[in-house]
Image: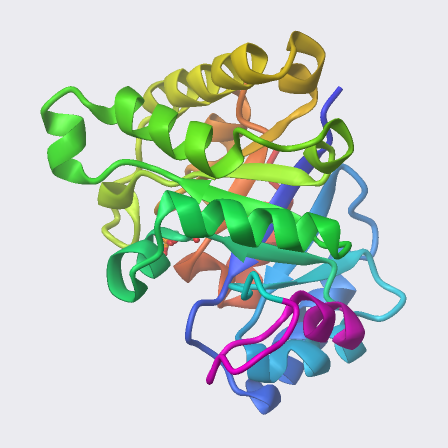
Amino acid sequence: MRRSIIAGNWKMFKTCAETRAFFDALIPEIQNVEHCDIVVAPPFTALSTAVDETEGTRVAVSAQNVHSEKEGAFTGEVSVRMLTEVGCTYTIIGHSERRQYFGETDESVEKKTLASVGGGLNAIVCVGEILSERDSGQAIEVVRRQVRIGLGRLTESALSHIIVAYEPVWAIGTGRTATPEIAAEMHAEIRKIFAEIYNPAAAYALRILYGGSVKPDNISALMKKEDIDGALVGGASLDPASFVRIIKYS
Ligand code: 13P
């Protein structure tokens, strides 16, 4: 059985003080949660605070992005080693907002993914089509390309540190969630691509999260689908009360 993951992507929200307040409210509510892994991805500036606040708890801390080089003259960037040093165990890679606003490509996703797992991080790698691609019937083809280029050349040991997040761009921050059926269809497709590239066992073991307007009132229906192994939550992960309700989906 694959273990579920509920992950919160805070994007460019929360200062260090707000991060402390969030965990002060969250931690007492999740003491007895054992059915899923919990991951929170604050902005770089709050990572260290988040690591301190979650020490000794079951919450893992993730970055939202990372650079593929070990170090160098890359103003404004952060390396894998910098993240592991502060206590991060995950990073998100290739989020659609990174692709859309910061020029990330399937090729940069591959480099970042290889660097991350090579340096000891678990990588939550995002894929997903934009609205015009879905409307023109190209959604599967687009995701296939993203997976093949971004995740097509991993070693067997690297694979166990990869989590895929399917985030249809038209469902992010729009309140328009993909139906559980639409999400499940793409998740099954992603698993099929992994079986083709690697092998059925690796594909079966892969955890695939859904992201895009996940809320307390739609998480349960999504999680009932066999190929949906968790969620990458944006807006609804910022409020501890709603994030707790998502973590405690039934
Ligand atoms: P929302 O949950 O706000 O739609 O954001 C989803 C997302 O982008 C998570 O990475």
Residue 26 percent coordinates (x, y): 68, 67
Which residue is drawn at the image coordinates 48% and 67% (left, top)?
10
Which residue is drawn at the image coordinates 51% and 77% (left, top)?
77
Q: How many marks?
A: 0
Q: Is residue 18 above or below residue 145?
A: below
Q: Residue furthest front?
A: 72
Q: How was the colour assigned to the protein in this rendering?
A: rainbow
Q: Residue furthest bottom?
A: 17
Give the magenta range. 70-87
Residue 90 percent coordinates (x, y): 67, 56
Q: Is residue 242 above or below residue 73?
A: above
Which image quarter holds the N terminus? top right
Which residue is drawn at the image coordinates 61% and 57% (left, top)?
91
Residue 79 on the magenta segment? yes
Residue 29 showing in the rendered view: yes
Q: Is residue 28 left or right of residue 72?
A: right
Instruction: Report the front residue among 226 and 240.
Output: 226
